[in-house]
Amino acid sequence: MSSLFPAVSPTPADRPALRFGERSLTYAELAAAAGATAGRIGAARRVAVWAVPELETAVAVVAALLAGIPAVPLNPKSGDGELAHILSDSGPTLVLAPPDAGLPPALSGLERVDVDAHATGPVPEDRSAEGDPALVVYTSGTTGPPKGAVIPRRALTSTLDALADAWGWTGDDVLVHGLPLFHVHGLVLGVLGPLRRGGSVRHLGRFSPAGVARELNGGATMLFGVPTMYHRVAEALPGDPELAKALTRARLLVSGSAALPVHDHERIAAATGRRVIERYGMTETLMNTSVRADGEPRAGTVGVPLPGVELRLVEEDGTPVAERDGESVGEIQVRGPNLFTEYLNRPDATAAAFTPDGFFRTGDMAVRDPDGYVRIVGRKATDLIKSGGYKIGAGEIENALLEHPAVREAAVTGEPDPDLGERIVAWIVPADPGAPPSLETLAAHVAARLAPHKRPRVVRHLDALPRNDMGKIMKRALNRD
């Protein structure tokens, strides 16, 4: 029996584990397919996984974990240059892929193993230690090529068990999502999470509000998504009573990977009576905090530290932010069994990422409310604006802007100002491109909701905000424009 996946065994034979579109596997079938694949990859040093949103990707990753071999998920949308770097850096022995997948030239030098989702083979004996590497997930930094975060097996188990505690997650839950599988959110939480609990996952393949409605009305109990997905849900709700009914039936609606605007929180709650809860994590840390299922689903916060996670806010000089006043901004640092062990082949970057007492420097800025709830205000590199002697988080200004009816999308950055140090810039996608809101209108709107020093000094109108595959706004692309 696997210590990671106790339910992945020949019995009970008819318990559903995975469903991707019309294709599905029971736990017995998954055990047989993963066992067969584990037998084929033998004693590989590492294996790359062509992480398309298909059944074979889940089988491949489970097989590697059962065999005790680290898996390197590859983003199918990556260019040849990035793929070449990842392969050179991680040195996988072979690549696992669905039989019908066309692989790019960058992978031509690797031995290919086609994953047969209907093969049969014995589940190997689990001989792995909790500190052994499970995954190498590549994450893009602000400069240079992506770094490979080595995630140990204990990080998977500690995070998934902490989320089970926070969310009341059991084997009776059926999760639906449409997230990519090369990332922690879609792969670790969205696939490995249900399998660790002995529950099941239904992957939409491609996200759509109609797909969400179908699965939640068909017995799914949980929905995982990113803010872009929930925004589309909020937009669809007024004209889709079936979607509203489906969301009402869900036991848990969870958003992550970026902040969900308060405006979308409120629109979903008003239409369904249900609140979306948020959690906070990173590739290097897996999950750090969450709003608990039995706690207050407070919009705009990511809840409290998960069991086993130590979290502190620090000033720029490293001294702790003592105040829990909802206003004092500090960088989040975390310590616990959920952390990665190293950046592969990057000892200097690994050393720089940790404090002498073992806390990971996240680069995320936050405040804490008196009851311990964490509210993230942005990234240290792009979202902390120092203006007129104040430290201001871009996130709260973005939320305020999104409350204005003339604003469809909003992002906030800082740019140099000879008087203020930095001035606040609002990047706006207007609700009506023919009548974009003026600077005076938006400045007054923000000043009335937050404080005068948080009002934008510049407004720039766009047709769309640049976003990555996970729906995060790419602010560095804005500042290059």
Image (cartoon, rainbow, N blue to C red):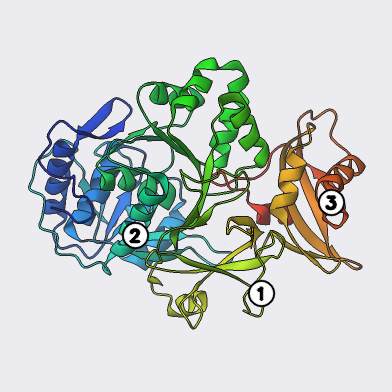
The residue under the point 58% across, 48% down is 472
Mark 3 or mark 1: which comes first in sequence? 1
The residue under the point 54% across, 16% down is 241
The residue under the point 53% across, 22% down is 244
In this view, the residue in front, 93 or 404, is 404
- Label pair 3/1, CB-CB below 8 angstroms: no
Is residue 172 at least partly visible in the picture? yes
Query: The disc labelled 3 sits on which kind of residue?
Result: Pro
x and y percentages locating residue 382 in the rendered image: 68, 60
In this view, the residue in front, 116 or 292, is 292
Is residue 183 at least partly visible in the picture? no
Q: Residues within 10 Å of mark 2 (few under 14, many from 20)?
A: many
- Residue named by callout 3: 456
The residue under the point 55% across, 51% down is 302
Query: The disc labelled 2 sits on which kind of residue?
Result: Ser
Question: Helix or strand or loop: what does disc 2 sit on?
Answer: helix
